[in-house]
Amino acid sequence: MIPWGVILFAVVVDLVTPHEVSSAPLLAVAPVAAAPFMRVPSIVAVGLVSMAVHAGLVAVDGTFGWRLGVARQLTLVCVIVLAVLLRRTIERHERAAGRAQRVAEIAQRALLPDPPADIGGLRIATHYAPADEEILVGGDFYTVRASAGTVRALVGDVRGKGLAAVQAANVIVGAFNALADDASGLEEVAERLDRQLQREGERRGGLEQSEGFTAAVLVELRAGRDHVRVLNRGLPSPLVLTPEGLVRELAPSREAPPLGLSALGRFDVAADTFPLPPGSTLICCTDGLTEARDARGQFYDPVARLPRLLARHGARLAADPGLLLGALAADAERHADGRRSDDRGMLALYSPPSSVDGSPPHPEEPARRR
């Protein structure tokens, strides 16, 4: 509507001003204003309407001549051509940006492939939102592995931004997927990831060698057990949403530094064990969620907000991890008025209530991720 509004405004200006005042400069704005929003045929139509309006106005004023009539008509023709060329340039940039975004999306899916919807009887859902919508890859990551009746998951946040953070995230995801099947426990997995990140920091050198680290949380669930083991290395505490709608924060009994700081000393921190009743959902997230701030600078508090979301969406939210993460992400976006200062990665594992024969029901919904 902007180009047509400019033409209408030009007509009003011309009619309420003396004859010596011309609205031709305003009419020349209309085709240029159409370039970012319209296709070429529409731009040409706006230009032709501008020329017709100008010819009609000067004819009514009786001032049509070489200077006020023909010269300005030629000027409008030149502006139309320039607007068309501008549109062509915008389209080329849009196509290039679209190709770059598709490449980024492929890279992001390669780094963060969708886990299966069902792993070891657990329903899995993930959510990832980059700090910059134009750049789909970042330093947050998650991965899930199942082996011999044990499901192990990792959620992490690499220090820094850009390609270096993506490379580090790729290293740790690959290392975890290789270690999770064979390691005796989360403590061994964390120790070996620590060494892997230290070697990666030495390879990259510079600041990454002395200050490169990865905040992470490792979780382990065994089939038929109603508890979860958690080893937190610098991320916000995981949350458990119980079947009764209660929210519990799984705070570590002992604080531990992020992974990749083994050069500062050895950190022998044992994993904590927490109850996970059937029908509960375990939620792990990076600090992109908890550090979302509103206009007053208040951080987002998922512990306080989850009961409100349950009251709004009903009990089905607690049984659908994809729906739960989607509602949580949308609520954080509203809290921060759409501002996102950091990448946001979330992983939810839902433990369905056991059926009569003791086996977990098969999920009907696939894992969801945005």
Image (cartoon, rainbow, N blue to C red):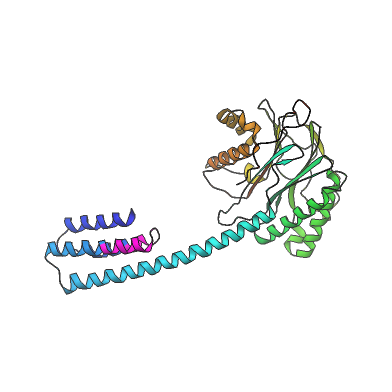
Which residue is most to the front? Answer: 357
Residue 370 lies, with reference to residue 361, above or below; the image says below
- x, y percent for residue 279: 71, 29
What secondary structure do most residues of the magenta stretch adopt?
A: helix
* Quadrant in the rendering for residue 197: bottom right
Q: Is residue 227 visible?
A: yes
Q: Is residue 46 magenta?
A: yes
Q: Residue at x 58, y 41 (%)?
A: 332
Q: Which stretch is magenta?
A: 31-48
- x, y percent for residue 97: 53, 62
For this rendering, which residue is in front, 196 or 84? 84
Which residue is most to the left? Answer: 62
* Quadrant in the rendering for residue 9: bottom left
- x, y percent for residue 289: 63, 43
For this rendering, which residue is in front, 303 or 360? 360
| 233 left or right of 185 in image | left
Which residue is most to the right? Answer: 184
* Quadrant in the rendering for residue 278: top right
Q: Is residue 161 visible?
A: no
Q: Is residue 345 magenta?
A: no
For this rendering, which residue is in front, 168 or 300? 168
- x, y percent for residue 233: 77, 45
Q: Count up the numbered dots.
A: 0
